[in-house]
Image (cartoon, helix red, strand yellow):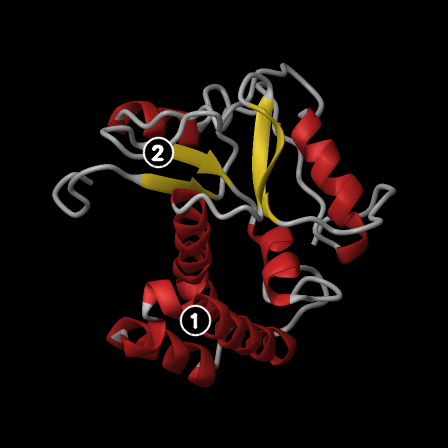
Amino acid sequence: MAEHVPGEVVAALDAPLVVRNPTGRRRCEALVTAEFGRFHAGAYPANRSNPLFDPPRAQTLAERFGWATDPGVVPGAGTSVAIEVYPHPATVLLFGLATVLPYKARRGRDLASRRPAFGALLDHLERVCDEPLRLSASPRWAELRAVVARAARASELERVEDEIDAVLCAYLAWLWGVRDPRMRVLGDGVEGYIVVPGTVVGASGLGGVG
C-alpha cells in the first residue's frame, strides 16, 4: 500500500470495521436500517459469531497499515484513518435516489435488469464524483463502461462490481478527508459505526435490505 499511496491515507471500507457484539446486530446497523430501510438500503447484521468478523477483516487490514479507526481521529498531519461506509445509503443520498439501484445480484434480477442499473450507477458516479476523481479522463473508467455496456453474462458484471463500488468508496474517503460537513457518523467508535454522506429528513421505521 505504501508503495502506491505515500503519506497519510484516508480509507473508506465497505465492510464491518468495529464489531464488539457476540450476536445480533450493531446499533449502527439498526440506525442505518431505520433511516434507509424504506429505500431498500438497510444494513446486514455483523457480529462475532460470524468467523468473517472475529476479528473483522477490515479491522485486520487497518491494523496492518496503522490506520486509526476511531471516527473522532482527524486525518492528516501524519495520521492515516479508516472509516466504515456502506454504498447503498451513500448512493441514495449522493444521487438523490428514491430507491437503491438494483445492480447487485439478487433473486429475480437478471442480466436484462442489472445491466441498465449498472449503467445508471456509472452515470451517477461520473456526474457526482468526476471532479475529484477525474473519472471521465481515466482509461480504466472507459474500460469499465465498455465492460458493462457489452456484458453478455452476469459474471461479466460481477467481475467489475467490486471495482465500481471501490470508486464510490474512494469518493466517500475524499469527502471525509476534506471534512465535508455532510459526512455523518451513525454509531460510535466503541461499538461500531457507519459513515453516511447526509441525512434523510423525516426517515423512520425499519425496512429491508437492498
Label 1: element kind: helix
Q: How packed is label 2: few (under 14 Cα within 10 Å), some, or many (20 or more)?
A: many
Residue drawn where x is 39% and y is 34% of the image: 82
Picture layout, residue 58 above or below residue 34:
above
Q: Does label 1 or label 2 sit earlier along the sequence? A: 2
Label 2: element kind: loop
- Percent x, y for residue 68? 36, 25
Residue drawn where x is 49% and y is 75% of the image: 127
Numbered tag placed on residue 19 in the rendering = none
Determine whether, in the image, residue 86 is placed left or right of residue 203.
left
Residue drawn where x is 79% and y is 40% of the image: 34
Pointer 1: what residue?
A: 156
Please state which of residues 113 and 83 is positioned toward the viewer in this rendering: 83
Determine whether, in the image, residue 20 is placed left or right of residue 79.
right
- Percent x, y for residue 167? 40, 59
Pointer 2: what residue?
A: 75
- Percent x, y for residue 60? 36, 25
Residue drawn where x is 64% and y is 52% of the image: 89
Please identify the quadrant where the N terminus is shown.
top left
- Percent x, y for residue 51? 51, 24
